[in-house]
Image (tube, rainbow, N blue to C red):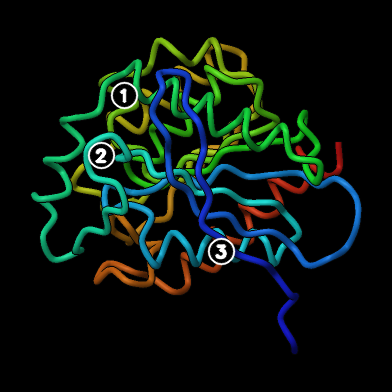
Amino acid sequence: MTEPEIRTSSVTVPVADGTTMGGYLATPGAAPGRRAAILVIQEIFGVNAHIRDVTDRFARAGYVALAPEIFHRFAPGYEGSYEDIPASIALTAKLTTEGVRVDLTAAHAWLAARDDVRPDHIAAIGYCMGGRLAFVANATLPLGAAVSYYGGGIATNNLDLAGALHGPQLLVWAGNDPWIPPADRDRVHAAVRDAGKRYVNVEFSGVNHGFFCDARSDYDAGASRQAWALTLAFLDHWLRAA
């Protein structure tokens, strides 16, 4: 079966602090009209081939998708190696809470201003570090939904944001995740539940952190297919069905 046509490009997003943020944009083919949109938030490894591929996949599913470069202030264009995790972890120490918030706000505003986007139908999805930032984005921006894959650091840094979540939240965890222990996953789940927010919380047993990424040794094809189907169903319900 022929895959749907998409268009891709590198873009520049102005940020309120005077910086500019690179990004990778993927849009469906030439069909007219406004569409729901997705902010695709990177792992610690940057907007690399895997994140660009995920962004393309959302475009083929009918979304306008933007992957902003969260490391743009100190490592523009960064693409880290999955074999050298410490080098990418070191970059995350340079992020600031305020810098991340203005970057997410800028990326959201840039998408919302496009004439092919429905500004009230924008979601965020992120992986690893990006999973935490998708959670932050949902508490910061008027999102229609958000998806966090194995969001490290939510339990230790961002539980207080659960009550501020705007859109329904999908939480996806890896059962064998050494970076996010079961107690931390449970704390995030409990915080969102106790805040009275709409959510889905799912754990894939027997898989490791990063299981969705087909460029990593921990990739699990079966869990990845199931998680992708769930993600599309969740987003379609809260963005397009709405």
What's under tag 1, amino acid-wise? Ala
Question: Residue at (32%, 57%) from the top-left corner?
Answer: 210
Would you say 219 lies left or right of 223 here? left
Residue indicated by mark 1? 155
Q: Are marks 1 and 2 in contact (CB under 8 Å)?
A: yes
- Identify which residue, 161 or 77, lies in the foreground: 77
Residue indicated by mark 3? 226
Neighbours of disc 1 within 10 Å: few (<14), some (14-19), many (20+): many
Q: Is residue 123 depicted above or below 95 in this figure?
A: below
Residue indicated by mark 2? 180
Question: Residue at (28%, 68%) from the top-left corner?
Answer: 216
Q: Is residue 166 depicted above or below 217 in this figure?
A: above
Residue found at the very far front of the displayed protein: 18
Image coordinates of residue 186 in percent, x first then y, are 37, 29
What's under tag 2, amino acid-wise? Ile
Would you say 16 lies left or right of 110 here? left
Quadrant housing the C terminus? top right
What's under tag 3, amino acid-wise? Gln
Q: Are marks 2 and 3 in contact (CB under 8 Å)?
A: no
- Identify which residue, 102 or 92, lies in the foreground: 102
